Image (cartoon, rainbow, N blue to C red):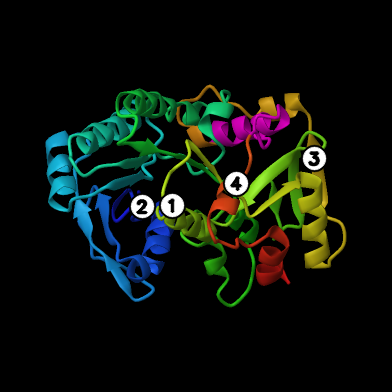
């Protein structure tokens, strides 16, 4: 059954806001009711002529979340919660799920994935925080076979990181709501920091298109367990050639890194969480953990035409 009344947890920033905007684009077409759950109070999110109210909640307080979800008669919860502290992140998602399950109208739940599927990258510590909720969802599905659905939305790497450092008049829009930094490719310096020989593939999806994909998926009659999307699937060497071609300034300064060189970036310091995350991700690419493991099914299930890497590069670097 299609989603009608949707709550996006953590929908005030980054990928969560893109998903809210994707839903607001189709709100009138499908007569949707959309709310955004947030730890703090703020004004409505407005996009495409539609609004979504922000409702403050305490993710550690199941009763308060239950009341909000019940008051709005929510049938679908999409979690975009994030964090670097395992206990707080795991508890928040689990509390959100338990609150949702106590609401009679709830039929669907999407946990916070929106990257490479967390189950296939065991070496990335931050992604291991995402596994407990998947285990819980599978248990719930066994108990509520016909009345409950969940899906793990995977999109690979955000294409928006390729826009870092562009000098277009509105160049900041290249990032959407995502953080501003380069990853693997720094076109502003005409450089690339590539793990291995560059022949491993990467799934790239623009954050704006992730929002469109997820929004469109809410209008599917049934959810599959895995919802895989992609704007492009390219080897790093193929991306490199596209970058060089579009920039038109000759060959990039490219460093091909061995496993030992990447591993040397790992730090035992507890305040180097993100540094370690990026190094672990590069190692996962080298190990093939980020390879396409399942059919990219969502591209065929919904009518979304995502932007490819070449078009994105031409928009911001051409």
Front residue of this view, candidates 78 and 194: 78
Residue 44 in the image, given as x and y percentages of width and height: 25, 65
Of the numbered discs 2 and 3, the one sitting upstream in the chain is: 2
Of the numbered discs 4 and 3, the one sitting upstream in the chain is: 4
Q: CA distance from mark 4 to mark 3?
A: 15 Å
| Residue topped by disc 3 | 198
Question: Which label is found at residue 220?
Answer: 1
Q: Is residue 247 above or below residue 257?
A: below
| In this view, the mark in front (4 or 1) | 1
* Residue at 51% from the left image edge and 61% from the top image edge: 208
| In this view, the mark in front (2 or 3) | 2
| Residue topped by disc 4 | 157
Question: Which label is found at residue 2?
Answer: 2
Left/right placement of residue 92 relative to residue 289 reads left
Q: Are marks 1 and 2 in contact (CB under 8 Å)?
A: yes
The magenta-colored residue range is: 275-293
Q: Residues within 10 Å of mark 2 (few under 14, many from 20)?
A: some
The quarter in which the C terminus is drawn is bottom right
Q: Are marks 4 and 3 in contact (CB under 8 Å)?
A: no
Tell me the SS state at disc 3: loop
Residue 176 in the image, given as x and y percentages of width and height: 50, 62
Left/right placement of residue 99 relative to residue 236 reads left
Q: CA distance from mark 4 to mark 1?
A: 24 Å
Left/right placement of residue 64 relative to residue 236 reads left
Q: Is residue 122 above or below residue 16?
A: above
């Amino acid at each position: 059954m299609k989603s009608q009344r949707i709550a996006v947890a953590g929908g005030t920033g980054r990928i969560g806001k893109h998903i809210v905007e994707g839903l607001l684009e189709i709100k009138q077409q499908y007569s949707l009711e959309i709310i955004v759950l947030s730890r703090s109070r703020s004004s409505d999110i407005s996009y495409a002529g539609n609004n979504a109210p922000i409702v403050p909640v305490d993710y550690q307080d199941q009763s308060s979340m239950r009341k909000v979800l019940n008051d709005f008669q929510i049938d679908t919860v999409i979690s975009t919660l994030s964090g670097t502290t395992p206990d707080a992140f795991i508890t928040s998602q689990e509390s959100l799920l338990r609150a949702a399950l106590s609401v009679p109208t709830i039929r669907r739940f999407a946990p916070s994935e929106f990257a490479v599927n967390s189950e296939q990258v065991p070496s990335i510590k931050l992604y291991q925080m995402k596994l407990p909720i998947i285990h819980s969802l599978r248990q719930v599905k066994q108990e509520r076979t016909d009345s409950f659905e969940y899906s793990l939305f995977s999109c690979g790497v955000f294409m928006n990181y390729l826009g870092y450092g562009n000098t277009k008049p509105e160049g900041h829009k290249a990032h959407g709501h995502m953080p501003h930094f380069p990853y693997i490719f720094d076109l502003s310096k005409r450089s690339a920091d590539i793990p291995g020989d560059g022949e491993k593939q990467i799934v790239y999806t623009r954050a704006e298109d992730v929002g469109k994909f997820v929004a469109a998926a809410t209008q599917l009659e049934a959810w599959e367990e895995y919802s895989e999307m992609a704007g492009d699937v390219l080897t790093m060497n193929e991306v490199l050639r596209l970058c060089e071609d579009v920039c038109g300034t000759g060959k990039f300064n490219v460093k091909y890194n061995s496993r030992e060189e990447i591993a040397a970036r790992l730090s035992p310091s507890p305040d180097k969480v993100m540094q370690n995350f990026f190094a672990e991700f590069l190692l996962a690419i080298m190990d093939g953990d980020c390879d396409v493991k399942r059919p990219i099914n969502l591209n065929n299930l919904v009518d979304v035409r995502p932007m490819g890497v070449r078009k994105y590069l031409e928009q911001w670097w051409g």
